Image (cartoon, rainbow, N blue to C red):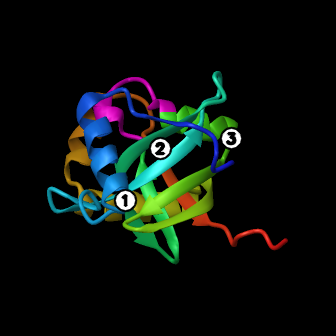
Amino acid sequence: MHEQDEVLDSPTGWVATHVRRYVASEGSKGHIWYGKPTLLLTTRGRSSGALRRTGLIYGEDQGNYVVVGSNGGSDHHPHWYLNLLAEPRVRVQVAADTFEAVAREAEEGERDRLWEAMTVIFPQYKSYRKKTDRKIPVVVLEPQEPAQD
């Protein structure tokens, strides 16, 4: 991802407001959202090629970050998830720290453990799972070391 690329924030009004507040304050306003830790995830649009940014509740696991593609229990995956399937290299901001990461779906051996950890952070994920027949993705964001020139 190139820093000079324009980043488009979520088209959902309250999410866009949250993201702008998060960015403007370098995470001091927005990192903790209603008591839940949130990060900003920037993906590359699978059709448009544009950079797309959204805010997500996260957990931590062994130096990685974990997010859930619940989409509020919708029968459709969130666009950010579909984008990272096409291009798993993403940008992440956690509080004031911004870094590149590679996204992957949690593997079967870790998925149940990570799902349970995320439902402790945000219990509403359990009700979202009951609303849909799709398998709600659990995504691991693995931070990458900066490239050496």
| Residue 20 visible, this orientation | yes
Label 2 sits on a secondary structure element that is: loop
The answer to whether marks 1 and 3 mark residues whose Cβ atoms lie closer than 8 Å is: no
Residue 93 locus on image (x, y percent): 46, 60
The residue to which callout 3 is attached is 87
- What is the spatial separation of the Cα atoms under label 2 and label 3, in whole angstroms? 16 Å
**Quarter residue 32 falls in:** bottom left
The residue type indicated by label 1 comes to Tyr
The residue to which callout 1 is attached is 58
Is 99 inside the magenta-drawn segment? Answer: no
Horizontal relation, residue 18 to residue 113: left or right: left
Q: Residue furthest right?
A: 149
In the image, what residue occupies the spot 23% across and 60% down? 29
What's the mark number on residue 137? Answer: 2
In the image, what residue occupies the spot 81% across and 73% down? 148
Residue 64 locus on image (x, y percent): 52, 69
